[in-house]
Amino acid sequence: MSESTQVMLNGLWWGSLGLGWADAGVLFLHFLSLSLLSVGGALTTAPDMQRFIVGQRGWLTDTQFTASVALAHAAPGPNVLFVSVIGWNVAGFAGVLATTVGTLLPSSLLALGASRFVAKNQQSRGLQAFNAGMAPLTLGLLLATAWVLFQPSVSTHPWASGVAAVATVVLMLRTNISPLWPVAAGALAGAIGLFG
Amino acid sequence: MTAALQTPPQPQPALPPGENELARPESPSHIFRVFTGLALQGFGGVLPVTQRALVEQQRWLSQQQFVELLALAQVLPGPNVVNLSLMIGDRFFGWRGAIAGMAGMLLAPMVVVLILAVLAGRFDQVPAVAGALHGMGVVAAGLVASTALKLAQTLRNNPLGWPLAVAFGAMAAVGVGVLRWPLVGVVLVLGVAAVALAWRRIARAVHHE
């Protein structure tokens, strides 16, 4: 392997900041410690990730941190992938592994255990009460998420945003079209400046 | 994934009876393919696409089962759709299904988002790109709201009775969304109240039988 190939691979694995095993380990442990606190999604622990990576270590600027979150929201796939983008920006592929595995491992093991417990105790009155009581909250939290996603555009372009959101709801409830169509239409309308 | 195809499925806790029209995934690799496909369609949130693909198209779950799994996925730590993908995979094929669901949900989108991260620095100043992101955000809000409204039909059979169930849903939506109260506190207070009320109603129904 030529020397330049090695330099390139090294850059991909460790990223542009030139961090090493010790830093990747610290990054992994920090994200690991936040995993079980992330009730409601990993985004709820983002303020603490920002405090550690931007404030304490100075690995990213505030702007880079926020851009990482926004990018993951715009891309297809779960929004939790913002931790992978942060890992990439801090320490290349090593960083991706550290932040992604750290964020997902503890919560996934817990979810697996909880799911199996629930499947075995389907008929218990406690679980029936849990399901009955939590179902309305679950739907309420979905509406809250919709409301939060709606905010950035409604302040600048209330009419266009309102019409687009209501039209999306009606299309999804009344027709069988793929959600990709309204998303593409929204992107197009946004690109020509309808939502500011 | 070919090896996974040839291994016979292991016995798993059965899904609740009475859901006769439901289908099953053929193999862990089938789960992987379906989750990869739906995750790549999920711009600005995967949940609406997940509900559509698993309940309406594949029919692996009923609306009721989907809401129950989602409720559990939401109260547990971790990203809701990732929790959901591994729980659904586990229900059908144990830990191999769980890994297939989670990998399907994460791997392909991760490749896409990392490529975008490399490109992002060059284009984020272009107004059309910023505008398109705004437009996708508005539609994403509509998609999530429509998922909530579709699933709201399940509240008719809720032991709380639908007026009370709708009231709890509205309180959670306003508390977390509009007033921006901390999620953990809202879920704890409303959740304990709703579960306790549901417990009493179920107990009373059993008593009257």
Image (tube, helix red, strand yellow):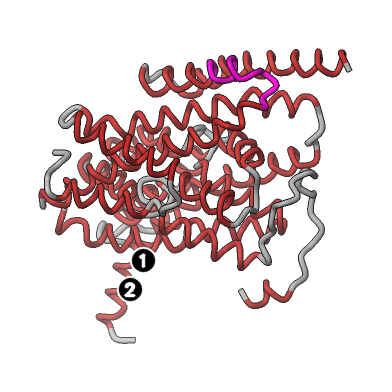
In the picture of the structure, the residue carrying the numbered disc 2 is: A9
Query: Quick one: which residue is furthest to the bottom in this view?
Result: A1
Front residue of this view, candidates A50 and B113 = B113
Front residue of this view, candidates A157 and A87 = A157
Q: Which portion, as a residue range, is magenta? A: B157-168
How crowded pointer 1 is (Cα within 10 Å; few <14, some 14-19, many 20+) is rated as: some
Query: Quick one: which residue is furthest to the front in this view?
Result: A174
Whether pointer 2 and pointer 1 mark residues with C-beta atoms closer than 8 Å, the reply is yes
| Separation of marks 2 and 1 at Cα, in angstroms | 6 Å
The C terminus of chain A - image quarter: top left
Residue B115's image quarter? Answer: bottom left
Assign a secondary structure to mark 1.
Answer: helix
Front residue of this view, candidates A63 and A20 = A63
Amino acid type for the residue under numbered disc 1: Trp
Assign a secondary structure to mark 2.
Answer: helix
The reply to the same-chain question for discs 2 and 1 is: yes
- Image check: B183 left or right of B113? right
Residue that appears at 23% across and 33% down: A152
Residue that appears at 50% across and 18% down: B186
- Image check: B61 left or right of B186? right
The N terminus of chain A - image quarter: bottom left
Q: Position of residue A194 (x, y in %)?
A: 14, 41
Q: Position of residue A6 (x, y in %)?
A: 31, 78
Provide the major secondary structure of the magenta segment: helix
The reply to whether residue A173 is in sight is yes
The reply to whether residue A60 is in sight is no
Q: Is residue B143 inside the magenta stretch?
A: no
Residue that appears at 60% across and 33% down: B71
In the picture of the structure, the residue carrying the numbered disc 1 is: A13
